[in-house]
Image (cartoon, rainbow, N blue to C red):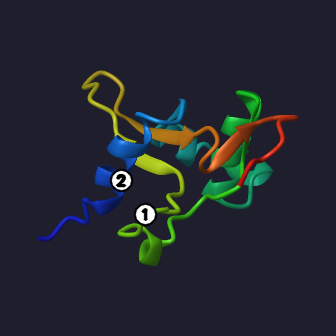
Amino acid sequence: MNLDSLPYKVFTKLKEKYPVVTVRLTDQDVSTPLLRTIYKTHREYVLNLFEKQGVDVYRFSHNYKSLTTKNPELGLVFLMGDSVVLPTYEIHALIGHNSRYKGAVNDN
């Protein structure tokens, strides 16, 4: 099994330059019937979690062709949390790279 670690490597470099906002998502969150009626996709739910934090995400997915260039276009980064009690996915946004605070002007 070959894991694609390139987005994570790019993320570790970019998080030194850009502030990171993290939301957490549990399996229970995803499987709740009420949420499935409110949000049509997991993507809508994740974007709503960031909106509640005051963050507008403008790049959800990676542009894989750009990740090896000088100006990589990284989307949100999904990582597994390390809690045994409540396993979660940590979803990271980089302010100024793939997201911005609500009301902020995008410099890109």
Element class at badge 2 = helix
Circle 2 crowding by C-alpha within 10 Å: few under 14, some 14–19, many from 20: some
Between 45 and 19, the residue placed more toward the observer is 19
In the figure, is residue 102 to the left or right of 48? right
Which disc, if any, is residue 10? Answer: 2
Q: Is residue 68 above or below residue 18?
A: below
Q: Is residue 56 above or below residue 53?
A: below
Which disc, if any, is residue 18? Answer: none
Q: Residue at x 61, y 58 (%)?
A: 60
Residue 52: image x %, image y %? 75, 30
Q: Is residue 28 above or below residue 107?
A: above
Location of the N terminus (image quadrant)? bottom left
Q: Which residue is mark 1?
A: 70
Q: Residue at x 52, y 36 (%)?
A: 18
Residue at mark 2 to residue at mark 1: CA–CA distance: 11 Å
Res 72 seen here: yes
Residue sticking out furthest to the right: 103
Residue sticking out furthest to the front: 70
Q: Is residue 38 above or below residue 6?
A: above
Residue 93: image x %, image y %? 56, 41
In the figure, is residue 63 to the left or right of 14? right
Element class at badge 1 = loop
Residue 81: image x %, image y %? 33, 33
Between 23 and 29, the residue placed more toward the observer is 23
